[in-house]
Image (tube, grey):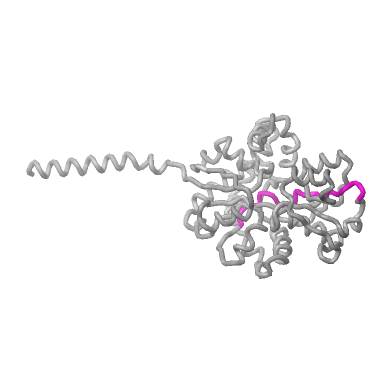
Amino acid sequence: MNNGSILVGSFTLLLMLVMAGSSPAQSSRPQQIKLAVSTATPHNTPLWVGKDKKIFEKHGLDVQLIFVMGGSLVSQMLAAGEIQIAANAPAALLSLIAGGENIAMFLGISNTSPFTLITQPSIKKAADLKGKRLGTARFGGSSHVSALIALDHLGLDAKRDKITIMQTGLDPERMAALEQKALDAAMLQRLATKTMLNKGYTQLLNLNQAKIPYQNTVLAARRDYMAAHPKVFESFTRAIVEGYAYVFNKENKQAVKEVIARNLRLPSANAAEDFYLEAQEELDRKPYPTVQGTRTVIKYVAEQNPKVASLKAEEIIDSSWLKKLDNEGFFEKAYKGKSS
C-alpha cells in the first residue's frame, strides 16, 4: 500500500470517528417547539410549570413559549407553520379548519368557560338586559362566544332583544367601562368578577357554575406536523401531564404561585392566590378536549360563519396521544395513584 492510500485511509477512519463521536451529541439536542399562547390566564399554568421546572427539557424538548395578543393571529401563525402548537380558543380555530386547514385539537387546557355575566347593580334579572350594552373582548373569541351562550341560557337573543354586544378590550377595560357606565354588562373572568361583586355589581350568570358544556382553550397543531413528529408529540404530552401533576400536588403550592406570579407579572406570590385557586378548580386532571364542549363552540361560531356548521367535533379532536398515555397508566404514575 502506498503512502497516498495510507493517508486517505487514515483520513476516512478519522472522519468516521469524528462523526460517530458527534452523533450522540446531535441526537441529544432538544427538539425545539414554538408554542404560542393568546391570553394570559391561570389555565396556562401547566405550560408555565413545564417550562419553569424544566419538565419539557427532561423530555428532550426546547419549548419556546410565545405570547401573541389575539387568538385569530395565533391561529394564522399555526396555519402558516410559524409555530408548531397553539394554546388557543377553539372559536379562533374553527373558521380556519372549515376553510380547509388540517388542524387538530389534541389537549383541553380549559374545558369550561371562565366567564361570568356581570351587570350594573340596577340589573337584577335577564329581562332587565333587553336593549342594553354587553362588553366582550374580540369578536369570535372566547368571551364573545361565552356571551352568546349566556344570553341563550337566559332565554335572550341579542338581535331580538336589541342587546348590543361591544368589543371593549380585556377585563380591566371592561371593568372600567362598567364603572363609567359605558357598559350595562360585561363578560368577566374570576378575579375581575370577585372585584366587581365586592363593589355591588350583579352576577347574572356564572357559566362555570351553570355547568354549560364549553371548550374554552385547547392545544392545537397541524396534523401533518404531528404525523411527521410522533415521538415529539408523545414526549410533549407526557411533559404536559407531568406539569398538571406538579400543579395539583399541594406540596408545590408556593412554587406554583411563584410561577403564576412571574407569568402574570404580579407583585408577589401572595397576589397569585386567587389565580392558583382558579387553576386548581378549573383544570382537569385528565385534560381531554371535550366533544360536547366543542359542539357548543361550533354551534355559536357557525352563527357568524355558516361554513363552521359542517364541522364534526369528533373529527377535529385528536386524543390519541392522551389515550396512549392513559392506556399505559401514565396518569396514575404521574399523579402517584391519585388521578381521579
Residue depicted at 82% across the width and 53% down the height? 210
Q: Quadrant of residue 251?
A: top right
Q: Is residue 13 left or right of residue 288?
A: left
Residue 20, placed above or below residue 185: above
Q: Position of residue 333 (x, y in %)?
A: 61, 42
Quadrant assignment, res 201: top right
Q: Is residue 159 visible?
A: yes
Magenta segment range? 105-122
**Residue 327: horizontal and vertical position, in percent?**
60, 52
Q: Residue sitting at 52 percent across and 57 percent down?
A: 80
Between residues 56 and 272, which one lies in front from this camera angle? 272
Position of 186 with respect to 101 (left or right) is: right
What residue is drawn where x is 83% and y is 42%? 196
Q: Can residue 208 be seen in this snapshot?
A: no
Closer to the camera in the image, 339 or 29: 29
Was residue 118 drawn as part of the magenta stretch in this picture? Answer: yes
Q: Quadrant of residue 127?
A: bottom right
In the rendered image, residue 229, in percent from the top left (x then y), is placed at: 48, 53
Q: Residue furthest left?
A: 2
Image coordinates of residue 253 in percent, x first then y, are 69, 32
User: Residue at 57% of width from left, 46% of height from top?
Assistant: 238
